[in-house]
Amino acid sequence: MEMYLKAGITKLFVGCSEDFFDHAVRKRYGHKLRQLAKDLHFDASQQDLNDLKDLEAMMVTGARYPVVPGPDGSSAEQESERTRTMWNGTSYFRFRQLALRVRRHVSHIDADPQRPMSHWRVPFGGDGYVVCRSGGGLPPRVTYRRGSDRMDDGDDVLQEVKLLVVARHDFTGMWDVAVKNEDRTGLPKLSKHC
């Protein structure tokens, strides 16, 4: 499930720096399956969200607190207790169907000719960049990284990014609904007035 969702996230971050993608996967998403599903606009029912929450807990518990064999050398009973809710027939079938739906959803991102994806990337302020992504079944997205020579420009940078983006004919009208992200990986912290 996590690998399917993170495969979808690679599509969301197309054109962004590898450092920004790595940082987002580790810090923003980690094992947060519900956040991954939300950002990929997966149509999740309340039962799906509950199941994703259970899977998150199982991943975190299993990774942080591995089962320790008892005096008899066996850990099967402890492991069975942890996974009992997932492995009964009804739950297993539900989790499997959810995984198949997630896989199908992710595989359709950027693959529907009725909703073609487009993206472009331009340099911005020396070593910075602006990336715009639209279509493909996901909301429009603008990611920018101010150049190291633009660190103290504050809100002026976002206005400059906006002018750059709305000037493109293929992104006209999408600025107001676009998800906007600043790539700050590897850059010094902004001063307080920004």
Image (cartoon, grey):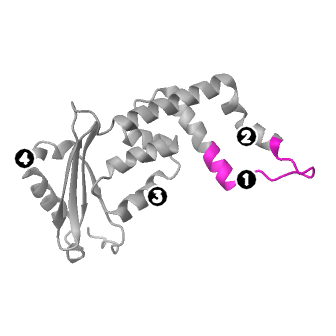
Q: Which numbered dot is residue 66?
A: 1
- Mark 3 residue element: helix
Tell me: residue 129, above or below residue 110: below
Q: CA distance from mark 3 to mark 1?
A: 22 Å
Mark 2 or mark 4: name the one nearer the start of the chain: 2
Mark 2 or mark 1: name the one nearer the start of the chain: 1
Tell me: residue 122, above or below residue 7: below
Could you tell me if the residues under marks 2 and 1 are in contact, i.e. CB atoms within 8 Å?
no
- Mark 4 residue element: helix
Question: Magenta residues, as a range?
Answer: 58-76
* Quarter holding residue 172: top left
Mark 3 or mark 4: name the one nearer the start of the chain: 3
> Which residue has dot 2 on it?
82
Residue type marked 2 = Arg
Residue 70 lies in the magenta-colored region: yes
Q: Residues within 10 Å of mark 3 (few under 14, many from 20)?
A: few
Residue type marked 4 = His
Residue 119 lies in the magenta-colored region: no
Q: Residue furthest bottom?
A: 149
Percent position of residue 62, x then y: 67, 49
Percent position of residue 158, x then y: 19, 60
> Which residue has dot 4 on it?
169
Q: CA distance from mark 3 to mark 4?
A: 34 Å
Question: Residue sitting at 71 percent across and 53 percent down?
Answer: 65
Mark 3 or mark 1: name the one nearer the start of the chain: 3
Q: Residues within 10 Å of mark 1 (few under 14, many from 20)?
A: few
Q: CA distance from mark 3 to mark 2?
A: 26 Å
